[in-house]
Image (spheres, helix red, strand yellow):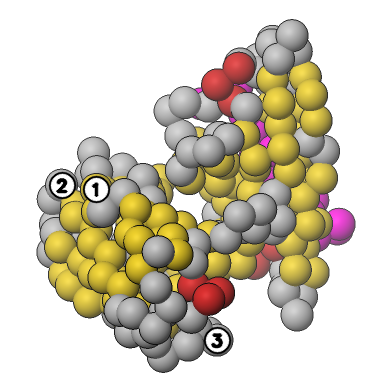
Amino acid sequence: EVQLVESGGGLVQPGGSLRLSCAASGFTVSSNYMSWVRQAPGKGLEWVSVIYSGGSTYYADSVKGRFTISRDNSKNTLYLQMNSLRAEDTAVYYCARVEWFGELSSYFDYWGQGTLVTVSS
Amino acid sequence: EIVLTQSPATLSLSPGERATLSCRASQSVSSYLAWYQQKPGQAPRLLIYDASNRATGIPARFSGSGSGTDFTLTISSLEPEDFAVYYCQQRSNWPGWTFGQGTKVEIK
């Protein structure tokens, strides 16, 4: 059974840092494309970052230069290092597996339960 | 950048009724569009991909249609567990993904 479990969220001051983890089971993280998607309180979904199976990484413009996606193959875990956090980064952060049928045909087929990040002084 | 616009924002219906949700893209996305369901406090769940293919385990009362810029998610007969928020999504601005703003299906 595929399962994704996020952790690491919490309250952090503006300008601070936080590292989120997403432990996967039932499949191999390094063989899949993995992504982070966030949802601000009461708002819609926003894609944040993706790491390809080959290791390439990409980011939304809103987090580029501040967030870093990575994975630990030995732990089958995905990470999101978040630096220089802002109030507008406050959201529930979900990790998700990308179901890849092709360059344009790619969707999020499994999601974690999410972890809340609150940026506030 | 391709923008997805969902309508209506809220749909008030009774159990057993048919729900029709719309998603319009600002330019053609061919058939590369997905629908997700999200219940309060839960993660989104993939319902439909490539406009009309049901994801694994999704009941047959959910169907998707459309291509190009206009897409529809239809729930043929609403069950109590179907009251939720629905999002459309497509791959755009390579290598990113974008979502519509959501349609809430609420009990009338």
Residue tagged 2: B26
Residue at the (22%, 76%) spot, across then down:
B65
The residue drawn where x is 69% and y is 11% is A14
Residue A72 included in the magenta stretch of the image: yes
Residue marked by disc 1: B5
Across and down, in percent, residue B62 comes to: 38, 81
Given the image, what chain letter belongs to the residue carrying mark 2?
B
Of the residues under marks 1 and 2, which one precedes in the sequence?
Answer: 1
Q: CA distance from mark 1 to mark 3?
A: 27 Å
Residue A103 placement: quadrant: bottom left
Mark pair 3, 2: CA separation: 31 Å
Q: Is residue A59 above or below residue B37?
A: above
Is residue B44 magenta-colored? Answer: no
Q: Amino acid at mark 1?
A: Thr
**Which quadrant of the figure contains the C terminus of chain B?**
bottom left
Q: Provide the residue span drawn in magenta.
A: A64-80
Asked whether A107 or B94 is in front, the reply is: A107
Q: Can residue B62 be seen in this snapshot? A: no
Which label's residue is closer to the chain start, 1 or 3?
Answer: 1
